[in-house]
Image: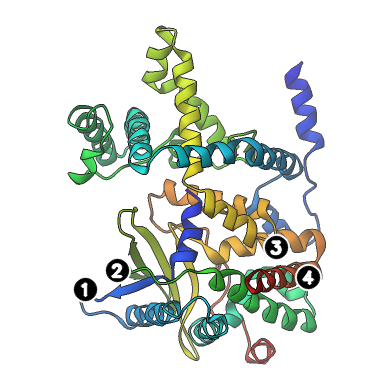
């Protein structure tokens, strides 16, 4: 059951948008549709073109995700006690981590269909867009996008699959490690994983 | 005597709660894992058993049987759990879901050929998944504490107790018991476990590969999935932004992060 989330993280991106809205799409719905569209474009690049793929995902993260907020929330209460140097280093390593360890592992786009089901306002600035991924014979997968109205326009701040949030999961892992071993240990661990992923795809 | 030893073990394995920082205390309560040292030990044990026994069995099962056969096996086992879905939906006061479970049992046991085919789903009776742990949750019982069960994996005191009660209220276990066929029940449980594991081989490998703390990742995933099941897909209070204002970041800090 738990695995649905990771499947989603991995499949998130292998999708296409069906534009059969029941009512005219709201602004956040259009935004999510556009983000998915860009992800599909990146996934259509051949696996061998690794640098290009990584660059596309890097641009996608930078332009459409509220990275400053994500980086801060994912470190939980330890953000405040971290030094400025640690914060800068962590932000950099974490972003690379998302690219190297997750997105670079995604396969090629496989004609999955994503449907925007509905959206619900959470607060004045936050909206959740519920989408459904249809994958041939397999059970459809529920994917929820949390989108925030920021000073720089709409940004994705979290993705959840079957009710399991990426940010909540990563935060509980990170805070657990930091509470036991400190921020530097977390940065070191992430750097190691990034290097391994790099090495793995080189060979 | 065993109980005394167990109690002593549990007490000695308790982590000490933080006493100073209020944020650390809040985090301690949110994680709700006072047995963490003991849990981590059992988790390591489970991971070991999984590597040498369960994962290979699950791989073999997937290799040996074509997917339509595995789906049929799963359908039969799922059909036998409909009485539990029915009873727990009723106990939760959810008449709609109880009706769905009863309808599914009726349709799939007859035209679905003893559950081999999930005809009910094609008729619009979507599967429901209700257990006594969820029933206790809707009655207002908290998790009490996170708990790793040997071999069975992540659970909580509430959900572990729920599993036991589900076993006792399931009419199938009584009939098997009366017929002296307890082994059938155990076999069904084992096959169900292998089947579940076989459906998550790549994804669990993926979680282990991508996590900095596999134990904490599984704890969070388990808890979020349970919340989602308890609330039947409605949004829950496990919000990563809970207590955070929308503008908790200032521009000065933002520039150091880009």
Estimate how packed mark 2 is, as few (under 14), some (14 to 19) or many (20 or more) residues with alpha carbons within 10 Å: many
Instruction: Give the residue number, with chain letter if any, for mark 2.
Output: A115
Residue B236: give x, y in percent of width and height. 46, 57
Residue A128: give x, y in percent of width and height. 40, 70
Instruction: Give the residue number, with chain letter if any, for mark 1.
Output: A20
Colour treatment of the image: rainbow
> Is B33 left or right of B185, judged from the image as shown?
right
Label 2 to label 3, Cα distance in Å? 34 Å
Residue A191: give x, y in percent of width and height. 74, 73
Q: Is residue A121 visible?
A: no
Instruction: Give the residue number, with chain letter if any, for mark 3.
Output: A175
Secondary structure beneath dot 4 equals helix
Q: Are marks 4 and 3 in contact (CB under 8 Å)?
A: no
Q: Is residue A72 visible?
A: yes
Estimate how packed mark 3 is, as few (under 14), some (14 to 19) or many (20 or more) residues with alpha carbons within 10 Å: many
Q: Say whether disc 1 or disc 4 marks the residue closer to the N-terminus.
A: 1
Determine whether B177 is above or below B9 in the image: above
Q: Say whether disc 2 or disc 1 marks the residue closer to the N-terminus.
A: 1
Q: Are marks 2 and 1 in contact (CB under 8 Å)?
A: yes
> Is A155 left or right of B144, judged from the image as shown?
left
The numbered disc on residue B154 is none
Instruction: Give the residue number, with chain letter if any, for mark 4.
Output: A188
Mark 2 and mark 1 on one chain:
yes
Label 4 to label 3, Cα distance in Å? 14 Å
Label 1 to label 4, Cα distance in Å? 46 Å
Instruction: Output the chain of dot 1.
Output: A
Nearer the observer: mark 2 or 3; the answer is 2
Secondary structure beneath dot 1 equals loop
Q: The C terminus of chain A lies in which quarter of the figure?
A: bottom right
Secondary structure beneath dot 2 equals strand
């Amino acid at each position: 059951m738990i695995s649905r989330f990771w499947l989603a993280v991995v499949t998130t991106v292998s999708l296409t948008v069906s534009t059969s809205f029941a009512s005219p799409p709201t602004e956040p719905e259009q935004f999510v549709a556009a983000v998915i569209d860009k992800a599909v474009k990146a996934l259509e690049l051949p696996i061998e073109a690794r640098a290009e793929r990584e660059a596309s995902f890097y641009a996608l993260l930078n332009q459409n995700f509220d990275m400053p907020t994500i980086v801060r929330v994912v470190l939980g209460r330890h953000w405040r006690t971290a030094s400025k140097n640690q914060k800068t280093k962590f932000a950099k390593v974490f972003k690379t981590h998302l690219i190297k360890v997750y997105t670079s592992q995604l396969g090629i786009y496989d004609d999955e269909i994503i449907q925007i089901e509905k959206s619900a306002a959470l607060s004045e600035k936050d909206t959740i867009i519920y989408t459904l991924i249809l994958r041939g014979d397999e059970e459809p997968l529920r994917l929820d996008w949390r989108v925030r109205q920021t000073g720089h326009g709409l940004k994705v701040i979290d993705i959840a699959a079957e009710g399991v949030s990426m940010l909540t999961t990563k935060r509980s892992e990170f805070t657990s490690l930091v509470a036991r071993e400190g921020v530097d240990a977390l940065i070191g661990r992430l750097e190691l994983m990034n290097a391994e992923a790099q090495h793995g795809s080189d060979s | 005597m065993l109980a005394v030893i167990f109690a002593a073990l549990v007490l000695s394995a308790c982590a000490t709660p933080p006493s100073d920082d209020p944020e650390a205390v809040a985090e301690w309560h949110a994680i709700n894992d006072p047995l963490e040292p003991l849990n981590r030990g059992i988790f390591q044990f489970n991971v070991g058993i999984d590597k040498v026994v369960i994962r290979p069995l699950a791989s073999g099962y997937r290799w040996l049987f074509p997917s339509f056969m595995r789906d049929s096996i799963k359908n039969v086992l799922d059909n036998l759990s409909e009485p539990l879905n029915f009873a727990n939906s009723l106990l939760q006061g959810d008449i709609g879901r109880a009706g769905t479970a009863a309808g599914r049992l009726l349709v799939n046991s007859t035209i679905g050929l003893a559950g081999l085919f999930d005809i009910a789903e094609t008729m619009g009776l979507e599967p429901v998944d209700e257990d006594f742990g969820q029933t206790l949750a809707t009655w207002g019982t908290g998790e009490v504490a996170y708990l790793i069960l040997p071999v069975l994996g992540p659970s909580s005191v509430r959900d572990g107790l729920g599993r036991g009660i589900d076993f006792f209220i399931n009419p199938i276990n009584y009939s098997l018991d009366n017929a002296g066929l307890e082994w059938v029940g155990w076999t069904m449980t084992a096959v169900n476990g292998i089947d579940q594991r076989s459906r998550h081989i790549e994804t669990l490998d993926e979680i282990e590969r991508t996590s900095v703390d596999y134990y904490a990742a599984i704890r969070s995933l388990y808890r979020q999935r349970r919340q989602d099941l308890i609330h039947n897909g409605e949004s829950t209070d496990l919000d990563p932004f809970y207590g955070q204002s929308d503008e908790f970041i200032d521009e000065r800090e933002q520039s150091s992060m880009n």
